[in-house]
Image: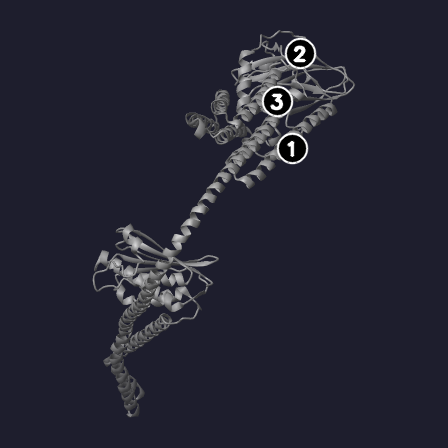
Amino acid sequence: MKFFFFAIVTFFCTILPFSGYCQSSDAQIVFQNSDGSQFINTGVYLFQDSTHSLTFDNIVHNPGFKLSPAAIPNLGVTTNTIWFRLTINNQSTIEKMMLEIDNPLLNNVSLYTQIGPNKYILKTVSKEASFYHRENSSENYLFTLEQKPGTAITYYLKINSYTQCIIPLKLGKIESINEADLNRDLLRAIYFGIMLVMFLYNCFVYISVKDKSYLYYIVYLLSVALVQLNLTGLGFKYIWPHYPGFEQFSTYLFSALTAFASIAFIRQFLNTKTFTPWLHKGFWLFVIAYAFTVINSLVGNKQLSYNLLNAIGLPLSLYMIYTAAVVRIKYKYKPALYFLLAWTIFLASIILFVLKDVGVLPYNIFTVSILQIGSAIEVVMLSIALADRINTLKREKEQSQAQAFEALKENEKIIREQNVVLEAKVTERTKELKESNDDLNQAITDLKEAEMQLVESEKMASLGQLTAGIAHEINNPINFVTSNVRPLKRDVQILFDTVEMIEKIGLDHFSAEEKIKQIEEYKQDIDFDYLKVEIDHLLNGIGEGATRTAEIVKGLRIFSRLDEDDLKKADINEGLDSTIIIINNLLNNRIEVVKNYGNMPLVECYPGKLNQVFLNMLTNAIYAVNKKFGDNAGGKLTITTSANEKNVIIKIADNGTGMDEQTKKKLFEPFFTTKDVGEGTGLGLSIAYNTINKHNGHIYVNSVINEGTEFIMEIPIHH
């Protein structure tokens, strides 16, 4: 909507230029007692600074000011700094007046008020500051003028704008201005009320029918409302007053959003993909153009972006009308007629709005609000068009259902005839199926017995691996204890001999000095200081061996719960540690194990069965690492645990050979294995998969060839 408005404004401003300025140095604006506000349509002098370098002192003494011939000055889209000079002669009885510039799209307005010879005070209202910094809480630019009756004061206005520079100047009593603004806000409230009703109505309809046309129309309604909020300045006043940067950017954003919504709506509403596929694709050019406009405004080229909006808007509007006309004329599609009528009414409202701006029509509350009136009528008509489209689809659906009902009746007749034949065949086939089912039941029984035997075989294999690992793990600390017992026994015997020697020396009749000397010589002979250190070292070694043996026995006690069938609360980290103890002999001090354990709650599970899963996962990981590194170092296993509100997550990763996609697809199939003959049964991961499923969990695999594999298991905390 707004892009069309900008395009028409630019067009009329081009074909209806100003005819020139009449210079008059003594024209004044006479303000008299009045109950209403009045537009200033005479006595306004205008000067455009194209250099942006003139100071206020230069402006005051500048002879280039010329009398504006238009009641409402319209300077088009300009980059110049606009200066107005007006002398107000107060012939009323009041001392406070209100000056209003009725265009909230302007960027900055500064008022210089003469308070003496060559003395002026400055007031500025800007979109570059928060709305609440304004002296008067209005979306327009308001300035309070304090001027004694019977005096004449010269005022200067400095205006900058990136958009259409239309300057409606209004002068009146404060009460009159406020009353006029209140009447205008009442009309706007009616307009936005209509838009809200249409928005909610179409939302409810979309929820009921799930038609995309309604969805796009809802977005279109929203974008039109946002455009009007921007045009009227109400968005900056009520919705985003603290974001002046967004207020300046919203002009381009909402214009583009309206264009996108309009394009999406017309393509869906008129079914252009079916009726006019070549025109359907052409809309993408406008989408790209508007996207470029928004991006261009973000990098600061606001003037160029505004001109692009004007340049693109009119072609897009004509393209949409042409598309609707083609669909209506060529295919007699009724919704296209509603679309053309709605846009024609809206076009008429835009033309009236522009005629007001160029001075052909008077500037009043009706012409100011004609754009809202036209858009309100347009959205209501489009809602009616959507409703008619739904009715058309409903009628087509009813016709289709009637045809389907006739077809169903014919099919029912055929089915009755076929039932007689089928019943005979079914009886014969049922007999054959019963015989086949008996054979299948026997085969299933045999398969279950074989499966139980294979599972027991896998358990025995795990038990054998458990026994071998425990034997190896316990043997090391026991050997350590055994090797320390003999030297400890020898050292204790030396201590016994030392005690006997000290007793013997103590019973002799030597002097105390001689006895001490003999004891010291004996201690040197047996190296008594080293003996103490050696005994302490041997006892520590025996203690470490005993502690290690106790840890292994504890790990064995935690791990060896393979046949437990009761749910228990168990510590997953503890189960992993016990499994690592069992397979420690397989690591051969060449494979690094990294544990990243999280703070885990107790999990309701079958602990022994999970330990068997961990055992299968870790032995497979060790096999893959050994396959890649052989007897060399560099292998690494990473075990990570974590928990969320519902699940615990266990990750077992290796840097081994990895696997391809084909292998991953077959990974959990029974008897599938990549190991050499005799090295695996192919049941380990299948049992692991079933065990995780039994826990209502999930298992995932990530793998890259020659980089490694990661198994991720998710298990519910509560079964």
Percent coordinates x, y for residue 624 in the rendering: 26, 58
Give the CA distance from mark 1 to mark 3.
34 Å
User: Going by the image, does 562 lie left or right of 291?
Assistant: left
Give the CA distance from mark 3 to mark 2.
19 Å
Give me the residue at 62% from left, 17% from top.
356
Discs 2/1, front: 1
User: Considering depth in this image, is 403 or 235 the residue closer to the camera?
Assistant: 403
Q: Secondary structure at mark 1?
A: helix
Q: Which mark is residue 110?
A: 3
User: Considering depth in this image, is 692 or 617 the residue closer to the camera?
Assistant: 692
**Where the N terminus falls, by quadrant?**
top right
Percent coordinates x, y for residue 120 in the rendering: 65, 19
User: Going by the image, does 569 lie left or right of 593?
Assistant: right
Up-down relation of residue 414 to residue 393 (above or below)? below
The residue type indicated by label 3 comes to Ser
Discs 1/3, front: 1
Q: Which residue is mark 2?
A: 43
User: Considering depth in this image, is 666 or 442 the residue closer to the camera?
Assistant: 442
The residue type indicated by label 2 comes to Gly
Q: Secondary structure at mark 2?
A: loop
Discs 3/2, front: 2
Q: Which residue is mark 1?
A: 193
Ranked by sequence position, the earlier of labels 1 and 3 is 3
The residue type indicated by label 1 comes to Gly
Q: Within 10 angstroms of label 1, few (less than 14), some, or many (20 or more) residues? A: few
Percent coordinates x, y for residue 261 in the rendering: 51, 31
Q: Within 10 angstroms of label 3, few (less than 14), some, or many (20 or more) residues? A: some
Percent coordinates x, y for residue 361 in the rendering: 64, 15
Q: Is residue 525 visible to the viewer in this orientation of the structure?
A: yes
